[in-house]
């Protein structure tokens, strides 16, 4: 996604610093399951063209479908919370294709069929950090590397390659543990969750679906860390 990645995070940072919303409670908290359509809390950010995001109905219920044709735009959900209270982020996703020219290690290959951001804003926008959970094109599953354009954005390959294409896959990450491992310190408060399907750098096309995005407290269930 070239230098747009940095602009995206700076824009997120400014938006997050103005966010007022906080919440607390027990059990899991639903960010969105899209059963009532695309919630008004999601804000679109366009950078090059427009990735189309729309809620579709399937036999398993509603989901958010993203389609990118050489475009780069994302959806941002501003929300302030502590990873010490809600360390787990879970979601379902499905990707129809990987990008032939996509390569997480190269600037010219910095496009993704699907990614979920967790953003940690800083009052200095260029100090904003994020964890990008990606459906990788070539990066092996479980590996993490800095974004080639913005090193404070860490890319984590939750899924990789074509083995599980056109299948719903469940993801569940302990973001608190990931942050400590990737950045070597305890995290500040989260400021936003974001979704992005982008293909502007490769000029290719990608289609993906997202669903059931939730925050969870730690439970006795194991956390899958591929």
Image: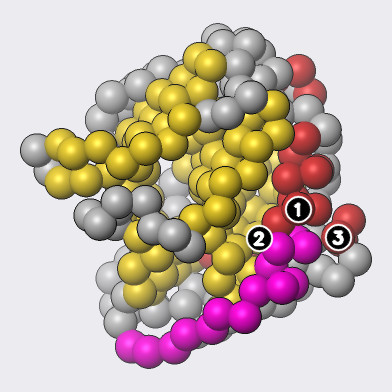
In the image, which residues are magenta? 13-26
Q: Which mark is residue 119?
A: 2
Left or right of residue 10, residue 44 in this image: left
Q: Which mark is residue 125?
A: 3
Image coordinates for residue 69, horizontal then vertical, percent = 53, 16
Residue 109 sits in quarter: top right
Q: Name which residue lies at 70% across and 18% down.
A: 201
Which callout, 2 or 3, points to the residue nearer the camera?
A: 3
Does 59 sit above or below residue 222? above
Left or right of residue 54, residue 104 in this image: right
Distance (Cα) linking label 2 and label 3: 11 Å
Distance (Cα) linking label 2 and label 1: 11 Å
Looking at marks 2 and 1 on the same chain, the residue that comes earlier in the sequence is marked by 1
Left or right of residue 85, residue 47 in this image: right
Which of these two is toward me, 90 or 125? Answer: 125
Residue 10 in view here = yes
Image coordinates for residue 1, horizontal then vertical, percent = 71, 28
| Secondary structure at numbered mark 1 | helix
Residue on which disc 1 sits? 11
Looking at marks 3 and 1 on the same chain, the residue that comes earlier in the sequence is marked by 1
Category of crowding for the residue at label 1, using alpha-carbon neighbours closer than 10 angstroms: few (below 14), some (14–19), many (at least 20): some
| Secondary structure at numbered mark 3 | helix
Q: Name which residue lies at 55% across and 80% down.
A: 21
Looking at marks 2 and 3 on the same chain, the residue that comes earlier in the sequence is marked by 2
């Amino acid at each position: 996604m070239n230098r747009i990645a940095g602009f995206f995070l700076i824009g997120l940072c400014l938006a997050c610093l103005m966010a007022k919303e906080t919440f607390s409670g027990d059990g899991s908290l639903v960010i969105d399951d899209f059963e009532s359509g695309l919630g008004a809390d999601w804000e679109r950010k366009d950078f090059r063209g427009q990735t189309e995001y729309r809620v579709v109905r399937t036999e398993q219920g509603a989901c958010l479908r993203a389609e990118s044709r050489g475009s780069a735009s994302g959806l941002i959900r501003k929300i302030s919370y502590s990873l010490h209270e809600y360390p787990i982020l879970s979601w379902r996703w499905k990707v129809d294709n990987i990008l032939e020219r996509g390569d997480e290690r190269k600037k010219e290959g910095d496009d993704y069929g699907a990614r979920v951001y967790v953003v940690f804003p800083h009052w200095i926008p260029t100090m904003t950090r994020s964890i990008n959970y990606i459906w990788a094109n070539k990066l092996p599953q479980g590996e993490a590397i800095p974004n080639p354009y913005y090193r404070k954005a860490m890319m984590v390959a939750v899924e990789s390659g074509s083995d599980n294409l056109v299948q719903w896959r469940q993801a569940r990450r302990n973001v608190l543990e990931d942050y400590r491992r990737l950045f070597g310190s305890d995290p500040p408060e989260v400021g936003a969750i974001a979704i992005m399907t982008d293909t502007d750098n490769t000029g290719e096309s990608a289609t993906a679906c997202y669903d059931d995005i939730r925050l969870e407290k730690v439970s006795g269930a194991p956390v899958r860390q591929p």
